[in-house]
Image: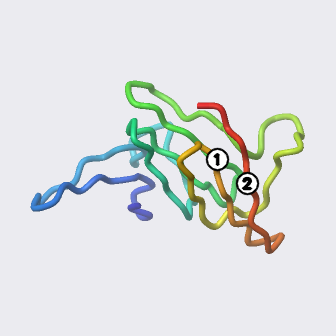
Amino acid sequence: MDGRNNRAMKWMKGEKEGIVVAGGRDDPTQFPCYKGLVIDHMGTVYVAETRAHRVLRWCKRTSQWDVIIGQTEQRHENEIEWPEDLSMDRQGNFYVVEYYRHRLQRFDVET
């Protein structure tokens, strides 16, 4: 994660330059405040965006983020507050650590 430039970078072993995976200063889909990042076996990037209280998904070959957990325009039971980190198990379940509520939640997310 490259916080100053609001982007996620991929660094290959032995390389001197990284590859922008998602976001960036000139990218309208950039994310301003994130704490956690997970990349699955398909190369899909998941980001915990703290200030917006949500988890975003960036699929390869797409031009924008998808909100999969948290704040949307309507209230849902999967609302989270100040997500600090996230993890994913082999079944595709997400585990989100919430700073504000001092808890860890599991979410079943269809991919």
Mark 1 closeness class: few <14, some 14–19, many ≥20 residues within 10 Å: some
Q: Secondary structure at mark 1?
A: strand
At 83% across and 70% down in the image, what residue appears? Answer: 101
Q: Position of residue 36 (x, y in %)?
A: 54, 61
Q: Is residue 99 above or below residue 42?
A: below
Q: Secondary structure at mark 2?
A: strand
At 62% across and 55% down in the image, what residue appears? Answer: 49
Q: Given the image, on which type of amino acid does mark 2 rest?
A: Arg
> On the rendered image, what quadrant is the N terminus found in?
bottom left
| Relative depth, front residue between 16 and 95 | 95
Which residue lies under the disc numbered 1? 93
CB within 8 Å, label 2 to label 1: yes
| Relative depth, front residue between 102 and 90 | 90
Which badge, 2 or 1, is on the more N-terminal residue? 1
Q: Position of residue 52 (x, y in %)?
A: 70, 52
The Cα atoms of the two marked residues, 2 and 1, are separated by 7 Å
Among all residues in the image, which is located at the extreme front? Answer: 91
Mark 2 closeness class: few <14, some 14–19, many ≥20 residues within 10 Å: some
- Is 57 left, or right, of 23 in this rendering? right
Q: Given the image, on which type of amino acid does mark 1 rest?
A: Asn
At 59% across and 43% down in the image, what residue appears? Answer: 91
Q: Position of residue 48 (x, y in %)?
A: 60, 55
Q: Is residue 85 above or below residue 73?
A: below
- Is 52 left, or right, of 47 in this rendering? right
Q: Which of the 4 image quarters holds residue 61?
A: top left
Q: Position of residue 26 (x, y in %)?
A: 39, 42
Q: Which mark is residue 9?
A: none
> On the rendered image, what quadrant is the C terminus found in?
top right
Which residue lies under the disc numbered 2? 106
